[in-house]
Image (cartoon, rainbow, N blue to C red):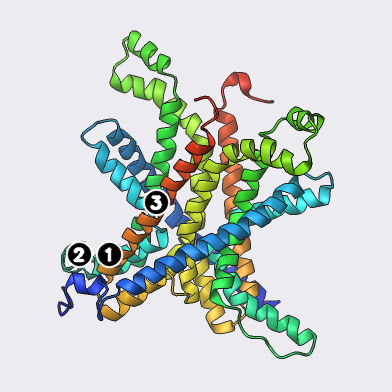
């Protein structure tokens, strides 16, 4: 029982690393995704956004993480440039790869929400004399938020799970600590099941939180008591 | 550049020093893992969907819990658990019967089962949605027209269910294809593993990871084109 307790404590102590990676890449990828959707609106920048989405959605995240951590590090300009202190850190590399990868998925979610907004509303906003920014802030954004939230939430859950890939480049997140414990105790089943339980708690908590937000954002008429 | 003895073309080419064939066979193995996982996931996902539709609450509970757990745990952890856990489990079972430890099962098998188990949780959701696509009246109508169960399935149920199920199944297939990269940790020489080995032994990681990315992109875009074709074929009789 002692082994279980110490392992569980070790895994719980690693939760902040997993959460830091998750929150940082959620913020980074959402910002980039917003930029990608904006870029898709203009004919000049659209190919760039499309290529970004195509590459990052079409290749495995694990490969992208290795590309950033090992691949880019082998290039002269990165190795000898001023960015090297960042690219030397596995946590930064995992964050960069996750941010780029997830931004492509979130951009697709946001684009779907944008096309779901009825055209008449934008015309109505124009007819009211709203400018570009007012329209974005008062008509488009609030609705996009509500329409995108369910799929956006799914992406966030996927992201929490994806953070485990950072362990493959020596980041000591929950999975990393679990592998470490197994390396010197050889008790595979117990440790991985404990780690799985930790992840399950995190994803369940996030799902519950998202459902609450979803309910509070629902239009007043459809809200259930 | 760290190592310039070999030109780029020779490195990823098909010559004696090139890794072209290794990368190609890795891509084939990646496809094989993804296909096996998809098949395992379809069978198990179908069973899970049927369980969720059953009237026995414990069957519903098992299927729902399965979906909750397998969709809430990282795929990497499932692969690790199966790869490192099954030998231990098999040894434990064998020792119960007084047999020697049977060793570890082949990496291809554990890898595709692991991805398949995750895939099943997602496919069950898709099938459950698809089953709702056929109104009950249609099945009654088919029965009234004297159709047997096989004809009913072929002519009434499948055409409508497939139409609903194909787009999300295409998505799941793409995820399987990309998740198969996780099987590389078991040492199976699929595309991710081959590119890692090549990167390590030539010290040209950028080249080989880029090559692997291109191969993955070819596979994902080719399969999405294929699915779009199937969808259009499936929708040829329906109104736009």
* Whole-percent x, y for residue A13 in the image: 53, 66
Mark 1 sits on what residue?
A: A87
Question: Relative to the observer, which residue lies in front, A215 or B184?
Answer: B184
Helix, strand or loop at mark 1: helix
Helix, strand or loop at mark 3: helix
Binning the other alpha carbons within 10 Å of mark 2 as few (below 14), some (14 to 19) or many (20 upward) gives some
Report which quarter residue A140 is drawn in: top left
Q: CA distance from mark 2 to mark 3?
A: 33 Å
Asked if residue A217 lies left or right of residue A63, the reply is: right
**Image quadrant for the N terminus of chain B?**
bottom left
Q: Are marks 1 and 2 in contact (CB under 8 Å)?
A: yes
Report which quarter residue B118 is drawn in: bottom right
* Whole-percent x, y for residue A73 in the image: 25, 68
Residue A200 in view: no
Helix, strand or loop at mark 2: helix
Q: Are marks 2 and 3 on the same chain?
A: no
**Is the residue B202 above or below the residue B120 in the image?**
below
* Whole-percent x, y for residue B239 in the image: 53, 24
Chain of the residue that carries numbered disc 3 in the rendered image: B
Mark 3 sits on what residue?
A: B222
Question: Relative to the observer, which residue lies in front, B227 or A121?
Answer: B227
Mark 2 sits on what residue?
A: A78
**Is the residue A13 above or below the residue B153 in the image?**
below
**Is the residue A26 above or below the residue A121 in the image?**
below
Please report the residue visible at 25 percent of the width from the left and 31 percent of the height from the top.
A42
Q: Are marks 1 and 3 on the same chain?
A: no
**Is the residue A110 above or below the residue B71 in the image?**
above
Tell which tag, 2 or 3, sits nearer the viewer: 3
């Amino acid at each position: 029982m002692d082994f279980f307790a110490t392992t569980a404590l070790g895994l719980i102590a690693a939760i902040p690393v997993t959460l830091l990676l998750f929150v940082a890449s959620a913020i980074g990828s959402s910002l980039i995704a917003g930029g990608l959707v904006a870029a898709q609106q203009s004919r000049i920048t659209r190919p760039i956004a499309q290529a970004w989405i195509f590459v990052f959605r079409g290749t495995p995240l694990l490969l992208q993480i290795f590309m950033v951590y090992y691949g880019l590090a082998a290039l002269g300009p990165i190795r000898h440039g001023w960015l090297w202190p960042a690219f030397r850190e596995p946590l930064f590399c995992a964050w960069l790869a996750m941010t780029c990868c997830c931004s492509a998925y979130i951009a697709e979610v946001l684009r779907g929400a944008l096309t779901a907004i009825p055209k008449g509303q934008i015309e109505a906003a124009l007819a009211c004399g709203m400018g570009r920014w007012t329209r974005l802030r008062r008509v488009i954004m609030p609705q996009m938020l509500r329409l995108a939230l369910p799929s956006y939430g799914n992406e966030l859950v996927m992201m929490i799970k994806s953070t485990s890939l950072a362990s493959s480049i020596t980041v000591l997140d929950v999975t990393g600590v679990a592998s470490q414990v197994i390396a010197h105790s050889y008790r595979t089943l117990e440790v991985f099941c404990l780690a799985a339980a930790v992840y399950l708690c995190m994803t369940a908590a996030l799902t519950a939180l998202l459902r609450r937000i979803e309910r509070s954002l629902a239009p007043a008429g459809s809200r259930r008591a | 550049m760290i190592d310039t003895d070999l030109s780029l073309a020779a490195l990823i080419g098909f010559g004696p020093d090139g890794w072209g064939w290794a990368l190609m066979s890795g891509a084939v193995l990646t496809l094989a893992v993804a296909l096996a996982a998809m098949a395992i996931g379809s069978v198990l996902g179908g069973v899970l969907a049927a369980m969720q539709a059953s009237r026995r609450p414990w069957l519903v509970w098992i299927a729902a819990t399965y979906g909750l757990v397998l969709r809430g745990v990282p795929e990497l952890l499932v692969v690790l658990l199966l790869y490192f856990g099954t030998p231990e489990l098999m040894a434990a079972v064998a020792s119960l019967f007084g047999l020697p430890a049977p060793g570890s099962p082949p990496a291809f098998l554990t890898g595709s089962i692991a991805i398949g188990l995750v895939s099943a949780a997602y496919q069950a959701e898709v099938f459950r949605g698809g089953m709702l696509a056929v109104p009950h009246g249609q099945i009654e109508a088919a029965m009234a027209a004297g159709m047997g169960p096989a004809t009913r399935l072929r002519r009434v149920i499948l055409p409508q269910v497939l139409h609903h199920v194909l787009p999300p199944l295409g998505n799941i297939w793409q995820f399987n294809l990309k998740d198969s990269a996780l099987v590389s940790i078991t040492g199976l020489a699929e595309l991710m593993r081959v590119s890692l080995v090549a990167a390590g032994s030539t010290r040209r990681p950028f080249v080989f990871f880029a090559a692997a990315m291109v191969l993955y992109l070819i596979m994902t875009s080719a399969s999405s084109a294929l699915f779009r074709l199937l969808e259009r074929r499936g929708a040829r009789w329906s109104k736009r």
